[in-house]
Amino acid sequence: MTRSDVTIIGAGPAGLAAAIEAARAGAKVVLVDENARPGGQLFKQIHKFFGSREHFAGTRGIDLARKLCQEAQELGVQLVLDTAAFAIYDGRIVAGTTPKGTVQIESERIILATGAMENTFSFKGWTKPGVMGAGAAQTMINLHRVLPGSRILMVGSGNVGLIVTYQLLQAGADVVAVIEALPKIGGYAVHAAKVRRAGVPILTSHTVLEAKGEPEVSSAVICQLDDFKPVAGTEREVEVDTVCLAVGLTPLAELAWMAGCQCEYLPALGGFVPVHDERMETTVKGIFVAGDVTGVEEASTAIEEGRLAGIAAAASLGLLSPDEAEERMTAAWERLAALRMGPFGEGRQAAKEQLMKVGKAG
Amino acid sequence: MSVAVDGFPSREELRRSPGYPSEERLDRGACAVIECVQEIPCNPCETVCPYGAIKVGQPITNLPRLDAELCKGCGLCLAVCPGQAIFLVDKAFAPGEALVGFPYEYVPLPAAGERVPATNRAGEVVAEGRVIRVVNSSRNDRTPVVFLAVPLEVADEVRSMERRGQKPRPGQGE
Ligand code: SF4
Ligand code: SF4
């Protein structure tokens, strides 16, 4: 059995940041990920990030991923890759499955940074080849350099839908339209403006009714919505070979559930999320959370939460003085607060506060 | 017409925003035009400007405010803006012609001297543009900026050019 001070599950932005902070404080850190390399979704985020200088604004996700991976390596973080964590026993043993069998890692503290999973929704023909998650399409173009199709319909105008649309254009595909069930565009206007000026229409109050084609998608039927109900007579068929679904994400909180962490249902955060306190500790002592698993946000917020969890875990092991930990955590909270301001962030900010209030009451 | 439905700001939304320079300033020569009208947490435009012409301040969700008198038209802010929301407009470029600069992250890139279809905020071709230069320095970090000479009357409309060279469908050959 491998032993460590801190075991982190998930090597995306939150997990890497947690690993860096904990290792910097002197903890022996094991970072577990089911993929063959660390970085999570960061490597496919080829666009420049928002925020300020402390949040790496203007840096592309892919470059940030390289930087974080290198830092973790230099600090001696032990990577356990190709390993899917499937259970936590006694709040201190992480069990994982690898191509060669199962592994167990015993540690004093556990940080869950498992991220989130793409949502989908069902409509006629939605199981046909050619219907896929927008994140899957992004993985294909930016990691594997394969174009999933040449004429694409994007369903959902949140930031994921808009960013992936832009990147599909960059990869050489045509995006026929972005459709949105709500009467207004969900994501940042600057992302919308980028794809509009590339000639992609964004159709608000629209949905997809059917994906047609045998066996794979060759067209899609879309229609207008009035108060979320299809308007008869507005159906039209668009010739596409791919339908991408960008309809939100759900936190991957299963391990927290199994470990007995109290979870709360908060729609603004994407569903059931583990309750935590200001130190990112769950209701199970010694188990911390960070990133999308505790509320779907962005890579930059995930990094800050990861830092918080890493600092708190190290401090709880006595590796940081209370003052030092306090100072670093206050700085991270300030950076987080800045990212959760404005019309797009304040809903998440309120939901996060609610989540932590529950944590205190419990 | 509004940014939340159309996906790009209307004339009124732009005029109301603190990042839009005055007509009089644009007539005098190259100036940044900031089309960032929604409060998002972001400020690299402020950090990068060597002349202090852009202010975001605290909180960082403030809209970027342009002091057009301080702007030297250097174009550094165009490539650093993650929203690709900053453009360069020079209405004193040549008689009857304006220069418009915009970020353009597509391949193949155009070359100086080429004539290309210039597009507006909705992606419609509104004029023919002449490529004056393409800036793709290491500082731009893989966000090339294309400068087009366009007829003066479309200087407030042109914000990009038509994408070229779409790839053939996978499996369909060349
Ligand atoms: S063009 Fe140059 S001087 Fe003008 S605002 Fe941008 S960075 Fe500043
Ligand atoms: S860098 Fe661009 S997106 Fe960010 S605040 Fe400035 S203009 Fe807006």
Image (cartoon, rainbow, N blue to C red):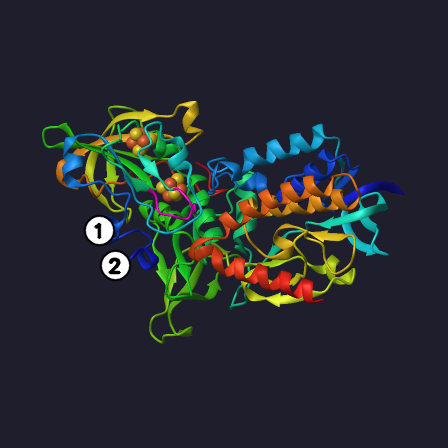
In the image, A273 versus A339, the foreground residue is: A339
User: Do the residues bearing badges 2 and 1 touch, measured as CB atoms within 8 Å?
Assistant: yes
Quarter that holds the N terminus of chain A: top right
Q: Note whether ligand 2 is within 8 Å of mark 2.
A: no
Task: Verify whether residue A59 appears in magenta.
Answer: no
Instruction: State left or right for residue B69 relative to residue A43.
Output: left
In the drawing, does residue A71 fall left or right of residue B104?
Answer: right
- Residue B149: in sight, yes or no? yes
If you read the primary sequence from the N terminus, does the residue marked by circle 2 or circle 1 appear first? 2
Question: Which mark, by number, is residue B1?
Answer: 2
Res. A275 image quadrant: bottom right
| Residue nearest the viewer, comparing A171 with A304 | A304
Residue at the extreme right of the image, as rendered: A1
Q: Is residue A128 above or below residue A50?
A: below
Give the residues in magenta: B57-64
Residue B83 visible from this viewpoint: no
On residue A220, which mark appears? Answer: none
Q: Which residue is mark 1?
A: B11
Q: Quadrant of the C terminus of chain A?
A: bottom right
| Residue closest to the far front | A323
List the single residue furthest toward the left: B95
Quadrant location, ligand no. 1: top left
Q: Secondary structure of the magenta portion, mostly?
A: loop
Label 1 chain ID: B
Q: Nearer the viewer, residue A294 or A196?
A: A294
Label 2 marks a residue whose chain is: B
Which amino acid type is marked by label 2? Met
